[in-house]
Amino acid sequence: MEGSAPAVSLKYALDDYETTYMAFRNLADRTRVEYRRDLDDLVRFLNTSSALSEPQAVELKHLEQYLAELDRRGLRGSSRRRKSASIRSFFSFLESHRYTVHNVALKLRAPERETSEPRVLTEEEYRRLQDAVRFHARDQAIIELLLQTGMRLSELAALTTADADLPAKVGRDKEAAGSVRLLGKGRKQRTVTLNWKACKALKAYVSTRPESSGPSLFLSKFGFPLGRRAIQDIVSKYLKDAGIEGASVHTLRHTFGTHQVRKGTNLRVVQEAMGHTDLKTTSRYIHLARELMDEQLQANAL
């Protein structure tokens, strides 16, 4: 019948979504993995809970039941919001490629955004962290890059030796600043300044970096590239050594944003350094910086 959708399986349509949509949108590798994982889980749920195997058989109520199931599994609202985005993207593809006649996900409401404040290290805490790592060149370079640039974990893990441009002599004047090229979300490239502390730590590591035929900047003691999990473990170790609780790699990114705003760095500069598309995202650090100032000045009354 004219206007009807072809009878294909959800699995077939999902494979086409991955090879066609993800490719022509040039989605980042991590995004592709996350979307595929999200949608594989959705398809399994639809197959097992409602015996649905074809796209055109899926109704809005089935997608709402899936989000309710994710809540029962204990997934945070942020994770369920991301999965909602995956679902909307997939069903938009299904409609545009005529696997379904109507996009039932158009009316799918994502869970409310959680408003918990991000963890930010105080100045005393991040100085303790810097002190805990000062005798380990590679690990010091990792932590200083995170603290001094606000780069993401994925960006740091992807760094190559060619991405960093270091001055011949480290100094505090602007002519002696270094830089690093980062590949951020959506495969957007940006160049971020390396201040003298980051340059000093990175030069010390590079001078002791083991020989390797590979381009990865940060290597294990066996010469293999450090992945995201290994970097997380390294940072967690020094956070524990410094007696800092409730913090993670991403805490260092928030620490950079908050303290740069507190010290008077222009908000546009912070936005560019952190790779935020929208200045509103960066603006939240104004509130966090003021909150941190209140806390510290109250605690350190003379």
Image: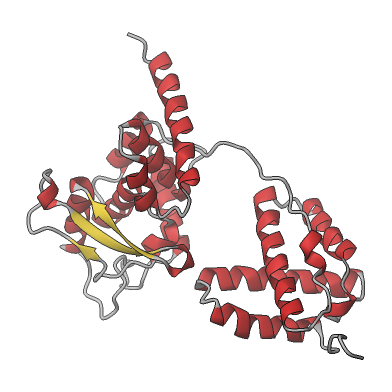
Number of callouts: 0
* Residue 100 x %, y %: 82, 79
* Residue 247 x %, y %: 48, 41
When the figure is inspected, residue 272 is found, relative to residue 284, above or below; the finding is below
Question: Which residue is at 23% across, 47% downward?
Answer: 135
Residue 56, quarter of the rendered image: bottom right
Assign the C terminus to one quadrant of the image.
top left
Question: Which residue is at 53% across, 73% downward?
Answer: 27
* Residue 63 x %, y %: 83, 63
Assign the N terminus to one quadrant of the image.
bottom right
Closer to us: 59 or 251? 59
Question: Which residue is at 67% across, 62% downward?
Answer: 85
In the displayed structure, does residue 116 sit left or right of residue 210? right
In the displayed structure, does residue 26 sit left or right of residue 46? left
In the displayed structure, does residue 48 sit left or right of residue 113? right
Residue furthest to the front: 2
Question: Which residue is at 45% across, 44% downward?
Answer: 282
When the figure is inspected, residue 168 is found, relative to residue 285, above or below; the finding is below
Closer to us: 44 or 183? 183
Residue 2, quarter of the rendered image: bottom right
Residue furthest to the top: 302
Residue furthest to the left: 169
Closer to us: 123 or 108? 108
* Residue 46 x %, y %: 85, 71
